[in-house]
Image (cartoon, grey):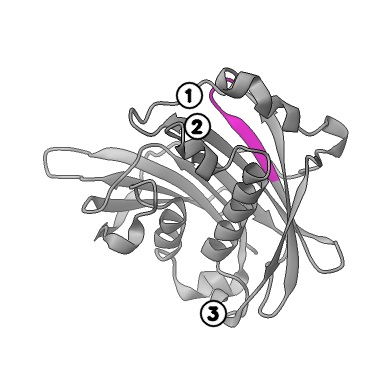
Amino acid sequence: MEKIDSHNIYVEPFHVDFTGYIFMGVLGNHLLNAAGNHSQRRGWGIGALNETRHTWVLSRLSVEMTRMPEQYQHCTIKTWVESVMRLFTNRNFAILDADGQPMGYARSVWAMIDVDTRRPCDLMSLYDGDILRYVVDEADNVCPIEGHGRFRFHDARLVRTLDTYYSDVDINGHVNSIKYIEHILDLFPQEDFTRGIRRFEIAYKAESYMGDRLTFYIQRNDADGSNDVEVRKNVTEDSAGDVVCQARVIFNG
């Protein structure tokens, strides 16, 4: 079986924002669908894993675009496994237009957890290390964007607090990874999006659940114009709460 999969998408009018280009959250969903289809065809999909009480969770995602897919455009997402470690696997993506020209790339890190204990699993011990068969050779692994960065918060300002509800939660019972992306991007003014998003990256630190209250903090980095966001759950007067995720947003220009 081929190690690299292709996932075709069509950008519907309700998938784009006021600029006519795809929402980052919708693009993120397509990336996750491509990853899920790739895994499913090789016996590592959610359906098969649930039979042994395992599931995949997204740990990190970085997306860097030179141009976003626009309304009515046909695109292809190619995805492959770059490497496998004991507790994590690295998966890459290429987003291509209808002519096969790159529009952007993405890097991701995934962990497999035990559904009951919520603890990470040893990927090398599952199915006798079968996952190693799908790692792509270095010569075919072209993903020219930077890896995942580090976050250091020192003067972040509180910008929003919101409660989580039914529509935030996915089949794993926790707030969906794409919902965090949508909530984070909602923090920025409309004029930022007229320039477009050049890079978005997010690191997931802990799970949150329906009914948790999320608090959002932004730190502007003047050196490169990036914006770092930290999301905490259940912050009170007496507690700083727990860090749920951290993200970085870089707009064009």
SS type, badge 1: loop
Q: Quadrant of the C terminus?
A: bottom right
Total labels: the figure holds: 3
Distance CA(mark 3)–CA(mark 1): 38 Å
Residue at the far left in the pictured view = 238
> 28 or 228: which is nearer to us?
28
Residue at 64% x, 34% y: name it. Answer: 90
Q: Which residue is mark 3?
A: 14
Residue 251: quarter of image: bottom right
Q: Range of the magenta residues? A: 86-92
Residue at 33% x, 63% y: name it. Answer: 167
> 98 or 188: which is nearer to us?
98
Membership of 89 in magenta stretch = yes
Q: Earlier in the sequence, mark 1 or mark 2?
A: 2
Q: Disc 2 marks which amino acid?
A: Met
Q: Which residue is mark 2?
A: 112
Mark 1 is surrounded, within 10 Å at the Cα level, by few (under 14), some (14 to 19) or many (20 or more) other residues, namely some
Q: Residue 116: horizontal and vertical position, in percent?
A: 33, 31
Taking 78 as reference, is 237 above or below it? above
Mark 3 is surrounded, within 10 Å at the Cα level, by few (under 14), some (14 to 19) or many (20 or more) other residues, namely few
